[in-house]
Image (cartoon, rainbow, N blue to C red):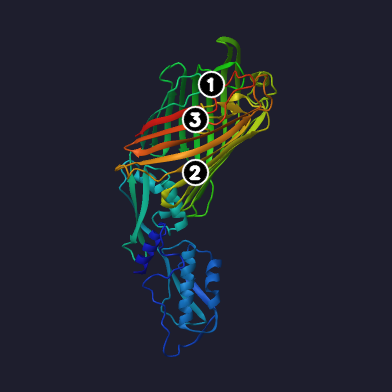
């Protein structure tokens, strides 16, 4: 009976609701009643504990030491037994309990017997798309013959459940052999194949207005949770204007870390506002990269998750500079930047905070051409050694009646002049709405967004599925360059206000529409690179479907 109740306690260990805490008494175990008659007294100078294989000797001594001495009673022995059992539970061994065998206290020694609830049988049930053996191997703490350490079990299950198409929950019950437990890993899974198609108008100045993007992904290659994805973006109104293809491969390790390999190929024939007044930039490029992602330790059930990322990229770009449609110069460049990043998420009942920090740096002459870097910015102090720090902080506060207040601050600082590939881009749906994508670029910059979002309007509109929100927002930011060109602004400020609608998860369809008004113009010193006047409005939209 006690083992059954401890199995229930083990299950409740994984639930975010009040349950059996490690220091709670096991239900059904009545505290020893005070004897009406005076109990016999005896001396206890030692507790002899047998059957333990998991708790260090020091922890056992610490638990029973207060009950040593002269003139002790049966009640003191019971208190020592309960204290030792609590020590096992506090250490995370919830299937362990302690008995006091019948005995005569000779030589002032009391025997306590530890009964370890080892796993007698482990099964995986309900899995359709994931290997049963692979799931078992990911939870070694529940292997047959092992005394489960529940903090480790929880960490291992959390690793399994990071895969959104597979959720695993343990079901424990007493085994056929007294003192042992059986565990079923109940699996709810879906086909780990996903696809997406989206149409949006994330366009830069002097380009066609629509973009078509899509992706396909499979998340369980080789039955090892390897993920392979491919994505693309094209300009459907003029196919040769922009074409981007990317490939990503994610490899989890047995320790919970990840390797990520990716490649990007872009072909572009568009006019880009690069900060060089009166010139057009046209270019092609390739990127190959490697990342190592390590989840960092965090307190259990704290709502805090954080990762460390290390990586390196190889970037190769071949740009052509033209004036009034005539090619002026070719600027091929390649270099090898390194990356160090930190990501964190903190969740509570009413708030969610996300932080992303990343340092990118390159070393002179390491697979880079100093002359090409010098030429890249029109001979304006650019060097092949550079470093920049990017940060992004988002915070969501859920107010009464399901209203939400969202805030975001994002920026970049650099050690000096950067080539355009490494600069900070401002303007567009992900920064300051009401402006074209990458309206302003600079070596450093900062922007902030404040947004108020309504509760979901789906029920009011009779929608049986999905979520629909309305919002109002204000955004502002700036970019700056260290050494502006003859007709280039040293600093450009953008700001806007607007409102929008957002549809999520409606039969796989999602959509966004934001209408924003620019509060600042974007003209350069002589007005040659201005695209937006104060008071101009711009509608941002995207419409997509997820499989």
Q: Is residue 9 left or right of residue 428?
A: left
Q: Which mark is residue 546?
A: none
Q: Is tag 2's residue or tag 3's residue first in the polypeptide sequence?
A: 3
- Work out whether 116 lies above or below 404: below
Q: CA distance from mark 1 to mark 2?
A: 36 Å
Which residue is at the front of the view, 110 or 61?
A: 61
Q: Are marks 1 and 2 in contact (CB under 8 Å)?
A: no
Query: How far across and down, in percent of the image, does residue 433 sit?
Result: 50, 32
Point out the frontmost of discs 1 and 3.
1
SS state under label 2: strand
Point out the frontmost of discs 2 and 3.
2
Q: Is tag 1's residue or tag 2's residue first in the polypeptide sequence?
A: 1
Query: How far across and down, in percent of the image, does residue 105 sit?
Result: 47, 82
Q: Characterize the local packing of mark 2: few (<14), some (14-19) or many (20 or more) Cα atoms within 10 angstroms.
A: some
Q: Is residue 344 left or right of residue 101?
A: right
The residue under label 3 is 262
- Can residue 298 be seen by looking at this rendering? yes
- Work out whether 242 lies above or below 352: above
Which residue is at the front of the view, 91 or 458?
A: 458
Point out the frontmost of discs 1 and 2.
2
SS state under label 3: strand
Q: Characterize the local packing of mark 1: few (<14), some (14-19) or many (20 or more) Cα atoms within 10 angstroms.
A: some
Q: Are marks 2 and 3 in contact (CB under 8 Å)?
A: no
Report the label total. Answer: 3
Q: Which mark is residue 285?
A: 1
Which residue is at the front of the view, 235 or 38?
A: 235
Q: Are marks 1 and 3 in contact (CB under 8 Å)?
A: no
Query: How far across and down, in percent of the image, does residue 215 sit?
Result: 40, 29
Q: Which mark is residue 406?
A: 2
- Can residue 340 be seen by looking at this rendering? no
Quadrant showing the N terminus = bottom left
Q: CA distance from mark 2 to mark 3?
A: 32 Å
């Amino acid at each position: 009976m006690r083992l059954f109740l401890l199995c229930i306690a083990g299950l409740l260990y994984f639930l975010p609701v009040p349950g059996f805490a490690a220091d709670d008494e096991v239900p059904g175990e009545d505290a020893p009643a005070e004897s009406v008659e005076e109990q016999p007294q005896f001396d206890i100078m030692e507790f002899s504990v047998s059957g333990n294989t998991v708790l260090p000797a020091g922890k056992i001594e610490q638990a029973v030491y207060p009950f040593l001495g002269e003139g002790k009673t049966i009640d003191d022995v019971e208190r020592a037994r309960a204290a030792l059992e609590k020590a096992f539970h506090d250490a995370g061994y919830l299937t362990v309990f302690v008995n006091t065998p019948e005995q005569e206290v000779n030589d002032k020694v009391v025997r306590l017997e530890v009964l370890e609830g080892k796993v007698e049988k482990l099964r995986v049930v309900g899995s359709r798309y994931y290997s049963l053996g692979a799931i078992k191997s990911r939870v070694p703490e529940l292997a047959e013959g092992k005394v489960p350490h529940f903090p480790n079990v929880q960490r291992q299950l959390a690793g399994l459940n990071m895969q959104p198409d597979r959720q695993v929950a343990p079901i424990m019950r007493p085994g056929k052999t007294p003192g042992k437990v059986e565990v079923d890993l109940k699996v709810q899974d879906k086909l780990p194949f996903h696809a997406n198609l989206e149409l949006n108008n994330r366009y830069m100045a002097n380009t066609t207005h629509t973009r078509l993007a899509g992706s396909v992904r499979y998340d369980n290659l080789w039955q090892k949770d390897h993920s392979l994805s491919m994505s693309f973006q094209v300009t459907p109104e003029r196919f040769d204007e922009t074409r981007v293809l990317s490939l990503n491969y994610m490899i989890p390790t047995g320790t919970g870390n990840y390797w990520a390999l990716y490649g990007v190929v872009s072909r572009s024939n568009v006019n880009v506002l690069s900060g060089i007044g009166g010139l057009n930039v046209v270019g092609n490029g390739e990127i190959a990269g490697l990342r190592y992602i390590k989840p960092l330790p965090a307190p259990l059930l704290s709502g805090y998750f954080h990762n460390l990322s290390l990586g390196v990229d190889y970037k190769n770009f071949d740009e052509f500079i033209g004036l009034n449609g005539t090619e002026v110069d070719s600027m091929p460049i390649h270099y090898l930047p390194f990356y160090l990043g930190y990501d964190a998420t903190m969740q509570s009942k009413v708030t969610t905070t996300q932080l992303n920090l990343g340092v990118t740096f390159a070393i002179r002459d390491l697979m880079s051409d100093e002359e090409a870097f010098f030429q890249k910015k029109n001979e304006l102090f650019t060097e092949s050694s550079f470093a920049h720090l990017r940060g992004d902080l988002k915070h969501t506060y859920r107010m009464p009646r399901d209203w939400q207040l969202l805030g975001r601050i994002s920026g970049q600082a650099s050690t000096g002049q950067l080539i355009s590939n490494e600069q900070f881009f401002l303007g567009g749906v992900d920064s300051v709405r009401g402006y074209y994508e990458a309206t302003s670029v600079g070596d450093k910059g900062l922007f902030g967004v404040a947004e108020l979002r309504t509760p979901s309007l789906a029920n009011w509109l009779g929608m049986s599925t999905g979520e629909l929100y309305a919002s109002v927002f204000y955004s502002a930011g700036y970019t700056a360059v260290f050494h502006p060109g003859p007709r280039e602004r040293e600093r450009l400020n953008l700001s806007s206000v607007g409102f929008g609608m957002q549809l999520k998860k409606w039969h796989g369809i999602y959509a966004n529409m934001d209408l924003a008004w620019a509060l600042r113009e974007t003209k350069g010193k002589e007005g040659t690179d201005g695209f937006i006047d104060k008071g101009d409005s711009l509608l941002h939209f995207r419409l997509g479907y997820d499989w």
